[in-house]
Image (spheres, rainbow, N blue to C red):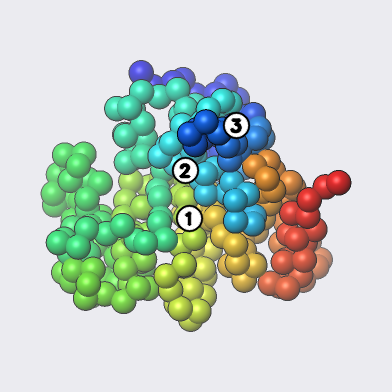
Amino acid sequence: MEAAPLPGHAPGILCRGVVKRYELGARSVEALRGVDLRIEGAGFHAIMGASGSGKSTLMHLVAGLDRPSAGEVHVGGTRIDTLDERALTLYRRRKVGIVFQHFNLLPSMSALDNVMLPALLDGAEHAVSEARAMELLGRLGVAERALHRPDALSGGEQQRVAIARALFFRPSVVLADEPTGNLDSAASARLFGLLSEIAEEQSVLLVMVTHEPAAAAHCRRVIVLRDGVVAGAFDTRSPGEEPLDAGALALRAQELARPTR
């Protein structure tokens, strides 16, 4: 049964006391140790942290790909950690867009069919779905590659197709987990600019997990995780000041991520 929206909560992401615990034989490991986080409104945000800080685990919980051991996860005003499996499947398909590092495109399907896949699973009308998919491929600059399979596309083109699929149902929240991990520096820079434009033009809350300061510099706000908790956050652009470059951003993130004594 779908949970009721959180009263008074604007669309966005809200985590309250989120714990994620893994049982490894006789040993219990906490990847998240009580995360409290609130992100509201449209815009491009980054979640940073060292390897093992819990950033990808947090992303998977917000995406509905896993469930917390304790705490609450709300997305778009709906508490998702209490949804049953059917409701959670519909949430992942319709309410949140997910962009993976490895693209996750089906190799036997064309770019067009990969973008249409959420609608095909939903039983939507084919002509309407095809028009929407072509609109998105055009917006992302790969319409001429619509009938090509993934193995005929460059890494940057595959990632654009994956982004088009994530945007198909016009979600208010899009999650990207290291989206340029398999791209070269030039393709990465183009993709960061594109994601920033999408967040602004389509009023989307776009949250990207990354360990790269150059990637986070494209975001308006950076949230830093340390040892499974939120260590702090900062804006990359302040009124009257120059935006933080990658070097200054890296120093700020390192200060927050530094272990406390």
- The outermost residue toward the bottom is 186
Q: Give coordinates of residue 11: x percent, y percent.
A: 53, 37
State the residue at coordinates (83%, 47%): 260
The residue tagged with tag 2: helix, strand or loop? Answer: helix
The residue tagged with tag 3: helix, strand or loop? Answer: strand
- Mark 2 residue type: His
Q: Which residue is mark 3?
A: 18
Q: Earlier in the sequence, mark 2 or mark 3?
A: 3
State the residue at coordinates (40%, 50%): 98
Place residue 16 in its image quadrant.
Answer: top right
The residue tagged with tag 1: helix, strand or loop? Answer: strand
Around disc 1, counting alpha carbons within 10 Å, would you say few (fewer than 14), some (14 to 19), or many (20 or more)?
many
Disc number for residue 177: 1
How far separated are the C-alphas under marks 1 and 2?
9 Å
- Position of 253 compared to 95: left or right? right
Please say whether residue 207 is visible from this viewpoint: yes
Disc number for residue 60: 2
How far separated are the C-alphas under marks 2 and 3?
12 Å
